[in-house]
Every structure is written in structure tokens, then in C-alpha cells.
Amino acid sequence: MRRTVQLLSDLDELSRLHAGALDLYLRPVDLDELLTAVLDDLGPGGHLIQCSLPEQLPDVIADAAVLTRVLTALAAESQRHSPPDSLTLRMCRDLTETMGGTLETAAAGPGFAVTLTLPAASRRPITPSTPSPTEDQ
């Protein structure tokens, strides 16, 4: 029953996405924090998930809730070892593309590998703070 409800939810989200009715809040997102939320969503147990990230990973421009959904769905799908053409991957690819990114999959042993690319958030220059009037006295 739970899988049926999730399937219906995914289909509804895909139809809203393709109709242009999905509102996004694009902002800089810290992937370290987001990945922690994804692992919490998955819960204990399951198969090993290997995640390769660059050491100096910048924030990315994304909708945090949508990206969390994409990464959680990808991780859950990888735990189920489903083929790379399943409905979940289609939804994840479409959601990623609406945030200006790309999602590519490739067979890797019994499972599959996913490469998700999003635009990097620009680093804001550090500006010196102006002293408050009480600091000048």
C-alpha cells in the first residue's frame, strides 16, 4: 500500500512539474547539511551507498526540499537495485533539470551510478562591517 501511495505521489508531482505548476525556491544550499537530512530520511539499515564528493564542494543553487527529495529517492532506489530507467529516476531527472542541473545514470555492477550536477552558488565577498556609532566614541 505504501509503494502505491508513493507511486501516485510521484505521478502527481511529475504531472505538476510538466504542467509548470511546481513552485521552486532556488537559493544556495549546503550539500553537507542536505546529505545529513537525506540519510535521516532513509533511516537505518539497507545497502551501502557510496557517495563521492569533491573536497571543496561549493554550495549549489537548488530548492532544498526538492533536492532532498531527489537525493532521498535516488538513495532509496539504489538500495532497491532497480534498473536505471524506473519512474523514480525519471522524476529525479526532471526535478533536477528544473533546478538547472543534470542527472546521468550508468550501470555499475549490480546497481547503478548517478552523477548529479547543479549550478554552484557564487561566493559572496566578505565586506568589512561598518562600526556602529557607539564604537566611534
Image (spheres, rainbow, N blue to C red):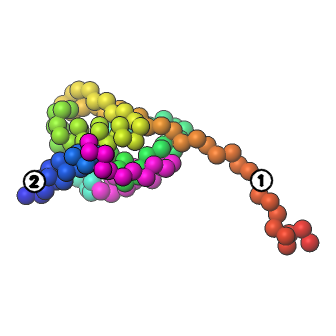
Q: Secondary structure at mark 2?
A: helix
In which image quadrant can residue 40 be found?
bottom left
Residue 131 vs residue 112, the one in the foreground: 131
What's the residue at 26%, 45% (across, down)? 19
Residue 41 in percent (x, y) is at 30, 56
What's the residue at 48%, 44% (across, down)? 61
What's the residue at 7%, 58% (across, down)? 1
Q: Is residue 39 visible?
A: yes
Residue 98 in percent (x, y) is at 36, 41
Q: Which residues are magenta?
A: 18-41
Q: Which mark is residue 128?
A: 1
Please indicate whether residue 4 sits to the left or right of residue 39 in the image. Answer: left
Residue 51 inside the magenta-drawn segment: no
Image quadrant containing the C terminus: bottom right
Please indicate whether residue 58 sits to the left or right of residue 80 in the image. Answer: right
Residue 109 vs residue 77, the one in the foreground: 77
Q: Is residue 47 visible?
A: no
In which image quadrant can residue 117 be found?
top left
Q: Amino acid at mark 2?
A: Thr
Q: Which mark is residue 4?
A: 2
Q: Which mark is residue 61?
A: none
The Cα atoms of the two marked residues, 2 and 1, are separated by 55 Å
